[in-house]
Image (cartoon, rainbow, N blue to C red):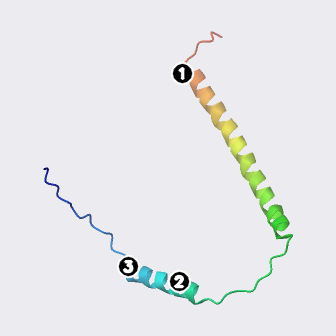
Amino acid sequence: MADFHLTRLPMPKVPPSVCRSLLVGLACLLASPGAFAYIDPNAGGMLFQLLAPVIAAVVGAWMVARRWLVDAVKRLLRRKNPQDPQ
């Protein structure tokens, strides 16, 4: 049988302030009382009205950037391979 040696990888040292912050956050989450909240049926409509323009702007920017990048690559390839004698 082969003899396997397990090596321990060094664990990164976590600062005490990070540990305390995580413990306080966990304690706050566990100690919070239950909420008797009412969500309006049209809350989804409001969320859509807020997110639709953001999504449209991101898609539009993506389309413009993609077109710019494709044109730049085509121009670069045309300069490297001058096959059209003009």
Q: Where is residue 81 in the image (x, y as percent from the top left)?
A: 55, 18
Which residue is painted at 44% across and 79% down in the image? Answer: 18
Callout 1: 10 Å neighbours few (<14), some, many (20+)?
few
Q: Which of marks 1 and 2 is nearer the N terminus?
A: 2
Q: Position of residue 3 (x, y in %)?
A: 13, 54
Res 15 → quadrant: bottom left
Whether residue 85 is situated above or below residue 52 in the rendered picture:
above
What is the number of the mark on residue 80? 1
- 38 is higher (above) or lower (below) than 78: below
Q: Quadrant of residue 37?
A: bottom right
Q: Nearer the viewer, mark 3 or mark 1?
A: 3
Identity of the residue drawn at 23% across and 64% down = 8
User: Which quadrant, please, contains the C terminus?
Assistant: top right
What residue lies at 67% left-to-right and 87% top-to-bottom?
A: 34
Of marks 3 and 1, which one's residue comes earlier in the chain? Answer: 3
SS at circle 3: loop
* Residue placed under numbered mark 2 in the picture: 25
- Three-letter amino acid code at disc 3? Pro
Task: Give the distance between the C-alpha atoms of the residues marked 3 and 1, in whole angstroms.
Answer: 53 Å
Picture coordinates of residue 23 (x, y %)? 47, 84
Tag 2: residue type?
Gly
Residue neighbourhood size for the residue with mark 3, other residues' Cα within 10 Å, grouped as few (<14), some (14–19), many (≥20): few
Q: Label 1 sits on what residue type?
A: Lys
**Residue receiving disc 3:** 15
